[in-house]
Image (spheres, grey):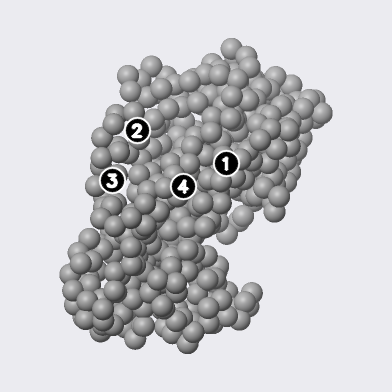
């Protein structure tokens, strides 16, 4: 089948590449010429600059110019198209509503082209962007306004975790399709034929509105799990003596009815979806006259988590950040990605700068280039206090205290490096509970403060 994917960010590029693996003729379209040229080059480093996803450059290299094509000219490829996937950004506004300007601008242009095509075969416009419930009907209305013949709409939300997007595209938990007519369902089934009768993968056909709602409910429920453990589990471990966080998690999740996912505690969840989607759902419910108290609490707990460890350091450890040098390990919102959107590290940096630190020595295995964009001194002169380093060891050198903000696996074995690079007394703020042998460090005089545990003063300093 001939498929156009509009938008080549994380979702669009992954979807285009993995769909091409199944032998479809896929055209990945974007208005960003520089981005498209980077993909066309096949150079892994240039591809990773835009979308850093394990295994994705290899798929592009293997399928490009056979099944996968990149273009900035959608008009030249519109004829003979069976399906057009919309993978466009829908960023949040200040009030929590979704900014659909990218979405509708692209859609109006595509509708005008479809109205002029000579090939009258059935074409389905399939939305993969996360959009407010009912947006599919607005898409349908735009097609009618442009008198587009023989066209349908569908919703096909994505459920791709960053860092594992390729694997989850190949082996999804479920494929959700919302459409209205048998013809439209039939076209989408042909695209996803490998999943339709799969023994493990759930292939769900429903209405467009239900498909749109499934994405919102799934993401807000996942964030609810995280916020529950941070707002309840972590508080118990920090408040009551001898409550062991790891044992608490194992004991509670031994019940088969209770999910193990999200049962970790941390300095908050980030990324491009959770915060944006829960704010949008709150806005949609409140606009419709419904209560959203539960979702508002979930959102506020998650935001609170991002900076409260700095406050605990002041209140419990007596930390004084003014004119101090802090090593910050981890900038991306989670391991295996360079994505810093809504990352906890953004709030950590903001909190540290507000408390007058002299320097933040930052390290992340993948996100240093992204960090330089987020922390551009031209936007805020305080960002000049951030220096970037090529290893945890280099970032630790000369620091007065440490903050771990991302769950990179390499940070689990950090205790020996800490001992070699900095001398006690020294405060370790562990936002991800990454150091399993923290007791060894405490015995050697290092102070340790982690989410889900009480403050442990270095024994030589007690």
Gap in angstroms between the C-alphas marked 2 and 3: 13 Å
Of helix, strand and loop, which one carries label 3?
helix
How packed is label 1: few (under 14 Cα within 10 Å), some, or many (20 or more)? some
Q: Is residue 65 above or below residue 431?
A: above
Between the C-alphas of marks 3 and 1, the distance is 25 Å
Mark closer to the chain start, 3 or 1: 3
Task: Assess disc 3: are there few (<14), some (14-19) or many (≥20) residues with their C-alpha within 10 Å of its C-alpha.
Answer: some
Q: Earlier in the sequence, mark 2 or mark 3?
A: 3
Quadrant including the C terminus: bottom left
Is the Cβ of the residue at disc 4 closer than 8 Å to that at disc 1? Answer: no
Q: Secondary structure at mark 1?
A: helix
Residue 248 got which mark? 3
The residue indicated by pointer 4 is 227
Residue 426 is situated, as x and y percent measured from the top left of the image, at 31, 80
Using the image, tell me which numbered label, if any, was put on residue 258. Answer: 2
Tag shown at residue 295? 1
Specify which label sits upstream in the sequence, 2 or 4.
Answer: 4
Query: N-terminal of the two: label 1 or label 2?
Result: 2
Q: Nearer the viewer, residue 400 or 315?
A: 315
| Residue at image coords 20%, 67% | 439
Q: Secondary structure at mark 4?
A: helix
Rendered residue at 57%/27% (across/down): 211
In the image, 129 versus 313, the foreground residue is 313
């Amino acid at each position: 089948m001939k498929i156009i994917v509009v938008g080549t960010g994380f979702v669009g590029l992954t979807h285009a590449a993995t769909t091409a693996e199944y032998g479809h003729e896929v055209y990945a379209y974007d208005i960003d010429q520089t981005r498209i040229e980077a993909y066309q080059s096949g150079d892994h480093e240039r591809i990773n600059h835009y979308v850093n996803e394990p295994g994705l450059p290899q798929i592009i290299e293997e399928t490009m110019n056979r099944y996968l094509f990149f273009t900035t000219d959608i008009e030249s490829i519109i004829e003979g198209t069976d399906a057009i996937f919309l993978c466009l950004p829908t960023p949040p506004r200040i009030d929590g509503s979704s900014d659909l300007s990218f979405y509708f601008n692209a859609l109006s242009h595509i509708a005008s082209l479809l109205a002029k095509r000579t090939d009258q075969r059935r074409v389905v416009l399939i939305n993969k962007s996360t959009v407010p419930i009912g947006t599919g009907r607005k898409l349908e209305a735009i097609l009618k306004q442009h008198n587009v013949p023989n066209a349908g709409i569908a919703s096909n939300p994505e459920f791709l975790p960053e860092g594992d997007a390729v694997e989850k595209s190949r082996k999804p938990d479920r494929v959700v399709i919302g459409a209205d007519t048998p013809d439209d369902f039939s076209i989408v089934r042909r695209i996803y034929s490998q999943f339709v009768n799969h023994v493990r993968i759930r292939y769900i056909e429903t209405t467009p509105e239900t498909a749109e709602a499934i994405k919102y409910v799934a993401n807000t429920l996942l964030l609810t799990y995280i916020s529950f453990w941070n707002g309840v589990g972590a508080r118990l471990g920090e408040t009551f003596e001898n409550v062991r966080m790891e044992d608490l998690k194992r004991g509670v999740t031994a019940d088969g009815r209770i999910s193990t996912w999200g049962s970790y505690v941390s300095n908050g969840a980030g990324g491009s979806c959770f915060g944006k989607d829960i704010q949008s759902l709150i806005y949609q419910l409140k606009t419709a006259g419904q209560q959203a108290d539960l979702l508002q609490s979930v959102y506020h707990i998650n935001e609170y988590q991002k900076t409260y460890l700095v406050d605990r350091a002041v209140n419990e450890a007596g930390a004084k950040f003014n004119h101090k040098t802090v090593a910050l390990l981890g900038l991306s919102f989670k391991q295996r990605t360079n994505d810093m959107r809504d990352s906890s590290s953004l709030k950590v940096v903001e909190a540290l700068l507000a408390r007058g630190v002299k320097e933040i020595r930052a390290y992340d295995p993948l996100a240093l280039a992204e960090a330089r964009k987020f922390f551009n001194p031209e936007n805020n002169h305080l960002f000049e206090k951030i220096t970037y380093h090529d290893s945890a060891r280099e970032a630790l050198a000369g620091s007065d205290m440490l903050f771990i903000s991302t769950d990179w696996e390499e940070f689990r074995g950090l205790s020996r490096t800490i001992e070699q690079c900095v001398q006690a007394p020294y405060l370790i703020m562990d936002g991800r509970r990454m150091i399993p042998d923290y007791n060894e460090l405490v015995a050697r005089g290092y102070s340790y403060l982690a989410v889900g545990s009480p403050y442990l003063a270095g024994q030589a300093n007690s």
